[in-house]
Amino acid sequence: MFFKKKEPMSSSVGYIVVGLGNSGTKYEGTRHNAGFITVDRLAEKLGVKIDRIKYKSLCTTCTIAGQKVLLMKPSTYMNNSGLAVTEAMNFYKVPPERVIVIFDDISMDVGRLRIRRKGSDGGHNGIKNIIYLSGSDQFPRIKLGVGNKPEKWDLADWVLSRFTESEYKSLTEAADKACEAVELMIDGQTDKAMNRFN
């Protein structure tokens, strides 16, 4: 069963799951908001609403694999995502290894997933800012493919463009897999998540 409780939850947040994106209706459904889309689906599956304004984010707490988890959608805009993430990390004293970041990747086809334990920013400004402000690249991440930039497109225009109907279907299927991956990762089974979904 999805999201079963394993053991009693501690009163403090043990993990942070953050989806990266840009706030506002102007950016809804854009490629750069794949992280927001995924965290919204995760909240839906868990029956919680991401509606608290705290840590420069919309957020909520929930239980995943017996752990108390903070779900976050930073409201800082993508390039300043680290402001929100580090504020929550510092408040709850959560180490980078327990911060799972979900974001878009233009080097993969729409609907592909790639899970990593840690790594560089790969040219992604949101990740770059989190690494810079937290002083660590040791946080696990789930990358969702949003399609390669067509040759004639400007990069900024491409990531802020909307998915086609068929692309959006592929993206939401990938987001559902990412939700399963989050549960495995919080349950200490990152290798299993990587083997299953990479």
Image (cartoon, grey):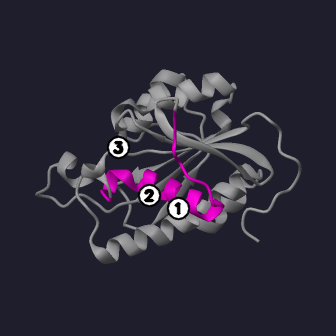
- Marks 3 and 1, the one that precedes in the sequence: 3
- The numbered dot on residue 23 is 3
Residue range in magenta is: 29-53
Mark before the other along the chain sequence, 2 or 3: 3
* Quarter of the view holding residue 70: top right
The residue beneath circle 2 is 37
The answer to whether residue 111 shows anywhere in this view is no
The image's mark for residue 41 is 1
For the point 30% across and 75% down, the residue is 165
SS category of the residue bearing label 1: helix
Instruction: Name the side, left or right, on which 106 lies relative to 129.
Output: left
Q: Amino acid at mark 1?
A: Arg
- Depth check, mark 2 against mark 3: the one in front is 3
Q: Is residue 188 magenta?
A: no
Q: Position of residue 187 (x, y in %)?
A: 77, 53
Mark 3 Cα within 10 Å, few/some/many (few <14, many 20+)?
some
Q: What percent of the width, then of the height, locates residue 89?
A: 61, 28
Task: Give the residue type at disc 3.
Answer: Ser
Residue 123: percent from left, percent from top = 35, 39
Circle 1 Cα neighbour tier, 10 Å, few/some/many (<14 / 14–19 / ≥20): some
